[in-house]
Image (cartoon, rainbow, N blue to C red):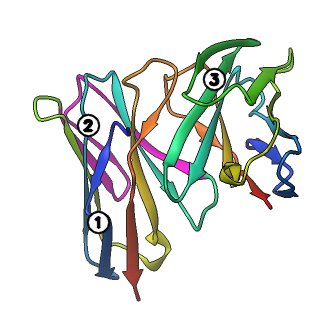
Amino acid sequence: KAGVTQTPRYLIKTRGQQVTLSCSPISGHRSVSWYQQTPGQGLQFLFEYFSETQRNKGNFPGRFSGRQFSNSRSEMNVSTLELGDSALYLCASSLVPDAYGYTFGSGTRLTVV
Amino acid sequence: SQQGEEDPQALSIQEGENATMNCSYKTSINNLQWYRQNSGRGLVHLILIRSNEREKHSGRLRVTLDTSKKSSSLLITASRAADTASYFCATDANRDKLVFGAGTILRVKS
């Protein structure tokens, strides 16, 4: 079966712009989580959605937002980009939250210049 | 701050040797998971051990969990060059999200 698909794989944006990243979970998976990975901070939780509802949110500013659609696909948006937002953004899906482990996508590498 | 702390930060071994990585965490958990990441790509789930389990095996992997010491270890036996990767432990201290450690970079030399 297809894995978790994240698009785009690479993105270069300018400070002040906004960006939207997409994640398609494994078919049947209803839980989608987003993580930011940077060399300095490591893997940091952004938010988690289950059945279109945000169940948990990490300690990130309001510029970071997300949503989940009825088909379980998820998008995250970052507005007013800053240089420090450059990171690998990872999406993970699971059948239900925190039961059997998560399947991660390959990530979107965002570079802000 | 991160919940899990891996030790060592980096490990270099010869092919065929065993690799042991340790993870310590701070608060009570429901389960602990180990993930592998190759060259900044996505994470691959390796194994999940629940708080009422003490040891779990999966192929060449053996994971132990000591909830009294709030620690876990991952043993990779008979390592291969393909095992070269970063390894992370993750806990569910806060429901619905994983809290990752800083990771151990494993290099297996052929």
- Which label belongs to residue B77? 1
Q: Nearer the viewer, mark 3 or mark 1?
A: 3
Gap between marks 1 and 2 measured at Cα: 24 Å
Contact check, label 3 and label 1, Cβ < 8 Å: no
Would residue B53 appear left or right of A16 to someone viewing this image? left
- The rendered magenta stretch, by its main secondary structure, is classed as strand
Q: Is residue B1 visible?
A: yes
CA distance separating discs 3 and 2: 22 Å
Type of the residue with mark 1 = Thr
Residues B54 and A88: in front is A88
Q: Which contiguous range is marked in magenta?
A: B43-66
Q: Is residue A27 left or right of residue A55?
A: right
- Disc 3 marks a residue whose amino acid type is Glu
Query: Hey, which quadrant is residue B41 in on the image?
Result: bottom right
Q: Which mark is residue A8?
A: none
Nearer to the camera, A15 or B82: A15
Which residue does the numbered mark 2 point to in the structure image?
A: B25
Kind of residue at disc 2:
Tyr
Q: Earlier in the sequence, mark 1 or mark 2?
A: 2
**Mark 2, chain letter?**
B
Which dot marks residue A48? 3
Mark 1 lies on a secondary structure that is loop
Against A56, residue A75 (above or below) is below
Residue drawn at the location 65% of the way across and 51% of the way down: A84
Q: Residue at x 74, y 48 (%)?
A: A82
